[in-house]
Image: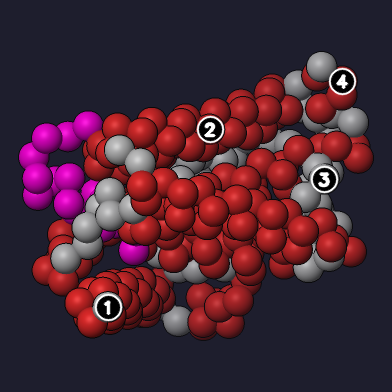
Amino acid sequence: MIEFLLDHDWLNREGPNYAFKADHILFIVIVMALGITAAILLRKCKRRTISIVLLSLWGIVVAFQSLYYGLHYYLCLIHYEDYVFDITSMLPLHSCSMFSFVFPVAFFVKNKYVKTAAMNFLVIVNMIMGFITLFVGCPTAGYSALSFFGFQTLMFHAIIVIVPLIMLVTKYYDLQIGDLKFGLMTFGTLATSMWIFDAITGSDYFYIYDGHTFPVFKFISENAHHLVWTLLIVSVYIFTGTLVHFGIVGIKYLLSKRNQNL
């Protein structure tokens, strides 16, 4: 099994010829179509059924993430090719990875304010990051959807988008206009923790310390003080999250008005 995984064609995670090719497009179309269909079908189901589906998807994410990092660490252990353990990039502390940790808080914690904060973070900040990575980050990074790392990464981020979508469409989480402050508090807590960790270790989890691992903004990260970068990226997170939050509130309002007029 290990030999199969280590085969170059399956393990391969790089190669610019893969960027925005048919394998990415087909994967995204199929998986997102299945996710949207599931969200629509689940609208008529009991809350318990929806919970089971969402928990199952979370379990898949955790399994994929564990296998992903586990294989990485194994490759580092046996010194496979250029795999060397690097604390600055090989821990599950990226913004998308927060899904694995925040999800159980949203579903198992009883305090309504903590639950609301976690759910709002999932459907606003976390879904945005998953969406950006799925549709832009993965293809431009050159991952092959036919490789282990590529398939895992695409599936991981697709589920991060699908779970909040199901939560919203089924009203499992009935987002309210005032919930944003709780979601941003969750983001602020996580971002502050990661900023401190980044400063101590020289990492760039959340892309929040100096952006040196975010090629799109490489010029800014190389020519501005890291505090300037931190303020910029935090502002982007907050602005985008606020925009999406009120966009969802607006859609909810329009749908309710339409239903009243029917």
Residue 110 on the magenta span: yes
| Residue assigned mark 2 | 60
Q: Nearer the viewer, mark 2 or mark 1?
A: 1
Question: Which callout, 3 or 2, points at the residue further toward the start of the chain?
Answer: 2
The CA distance from mark 3 to mark 2 is: 18 Å
Find residue 262 and name its label.
Answer: 1
Residue drawn at x 91%, y 40% as measured from the top left = 9
User: Marks 1/3: CA distance?
Assistant: 47 Å
What residue is shown with label 3? 146
Segment tinted magenta in the rendering = 108-124
Q: Earlier in the sequence, mark 4 or mark 3?
A: 4
Q: Are marks 4 and 3 in contact (CB under 8 Å)?
A: no
The residues tagged by marks 4 and 2 sit, at their Cα atoms, a distance apart of 24 Å
Q: Earlier in the sequence, mark 1 or mark 3?
A: 3
Q: Would you say the magenta stretch is mainly helix, strand or loop?
A: helix
Contact between labelled residues 1 and 2, with CB atoms less than 8 Å apart: no
Where disc 4 sits, the SS reads helix
Q: Amino acid at mark 4?
A: Glu
Q: Nearer the viewer, residue 75 or 223?
A: 75
Q: CA distance from mark 2 to mark 1?
A: 40 Å
